[in-house]
Image (spheres, rainbow, N blue to C red):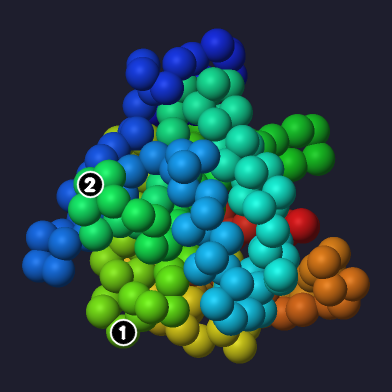
Amino acid sequence: MTAPTTGGYTRESAKCMGPYTVCQDPSLYLSAVEFSDIPEMVRILNINQDVYNGSALFQYPYLESHAQDRIQKAHNTVSAIGINTHWAMRTTPHGPLIGWAHLHFDHYDEKHPQPVHPVTGTPLTVADIGYWLSPEHTGKGFAARVGRFLVEEIAIKDMGCDIVRAVSYVENWPSRKVAERAGMELELASKSILIPKLGVMRDICTYAVHKDPATKSIVKIDYDY
C-alpha cells in the first residue's frame, strides 16, 4: 500500500484505526488518537520534561492547545489519505492514553525525489516512526513492544512500507534502545541539525528497518524540523 494523495476520507472508512492488540500479558493496545485524549495527554506531558528533552517538537509546559493542534493534524491526515498514522497506547482497547506512537510518510519534491529500488527501479514507500510513553508506565517494555509492532505489523505489513526509520538525539539512549529492540539497525551514526524550538544545533542519529536488504544502500541524510 502506498499513501493515497486524494482527500475526503472518513474515520469510519479509514485504514489502520485499530484497536490493535500489541500484547496481552501485560495488556497493551494501539488505537487512533481522539480529542477525548487531550486531558490525559496534557497531564502526562507535564509530569516531567523527559518528552520535551527527547523530542525536537514537543513543548514544555505542554498546553491543551498543543494537544488540540497535534490531534487535529492527526485527524486531518486520516481525512487526506484514508490511513490513520497516529495511535494512543492504552492498557485496554479504549482506555485512557498512556503513550503515543505515530508514523510519518516521507514527502518528495524535485530537491528530494522519491527513492527507488536499486535493482528493480520500483518506487519505495518510506516512513519515519516516533513514540513516547508516560513515565508512570516505563520499565515494563511497552515502548519496545509498540516500536516492534509499529514497524512489523503496521508499517510493513498493513501499509506496505519498504523502509521504516526512527530518529533520535545521539545521547538519548533510552529512545535508541527502543529502536534497537524494535529490530532496527543504526543507519546514520550522527548528523548535526537545527532544532527550531531550542534555536541550537543538535546531533541526531537514525535507525532503520529495510524490508529488502538490497535497499540498505539508501540512507536518508536530510532532516529538518
The residue closer to the viewer here, 145 or 183, is: 145
Residue pictured at 34% horizontal, 34% vertical: 16
Tag 1: amino acid: Gly
Query: Where in the figure is residue 39, as x and y percent of width and height?
Result: 52, 54
Q: Secondary structure at mark 1?
A: loop
Residue pictured at 53% horizontal, 50% vertical: 38
Query: Where in the figure is residue 31, as x and y percent of width and height?
Result: 33, 43
The residue closer to the viewer here, 64 or 204, is: 64
The residue closer to the viewer here, 111 or 156, is: 156
Give the quadrant of residue 182. Answer: bottom left
- Quadrant of the frame with the N terminus: top left
If you read the primary sequence from the N terminus, does the residue marked by circle 1 or circle 2 appear first? 2
Question: Dot 1: within a 10 Å radius of its alpha carbon, few (fewer than 14), some, or many (20 or more) residues?
Answer: few
Question: Dot 2: within a 10 Å radius of its alpha carbon, few (fewer than 14), some, or many (20 or more) residues?
Answer: some
The residue closer to the viewer here, 1 or 143, is: 143
The residue tagged 1 is: 139
Mark on residue 175? none
Query: Where in the figure is residue 23, as x and y percent of width and height?
Result: 15, 60
Residue pictured at 60% horizontal, 72% vertical: 46
Q: In the image, is residue 101 above or below residue 55?
A: above
Left or right side of 56 for 42: left
Left or right side of 118 for 213: left
**Callout in the foreground (1, 2):** 2
Q: Is residue 24 visible?
A: yes
Q: Secondary structure at mark 2?
A: loop
The residue tagged 2 is: 93
Tag 2: amino acid: Pro
Residue pictured at 24% horizontal, 59% vertical: 91
Q: Is residue 213 visible?
A: no
How far is disc 1 from disc 2 in space, using C-alphas? 21 Å
Query: Where in the figure is residue 145, as x and y percent of width and height?
Result: 27, 66
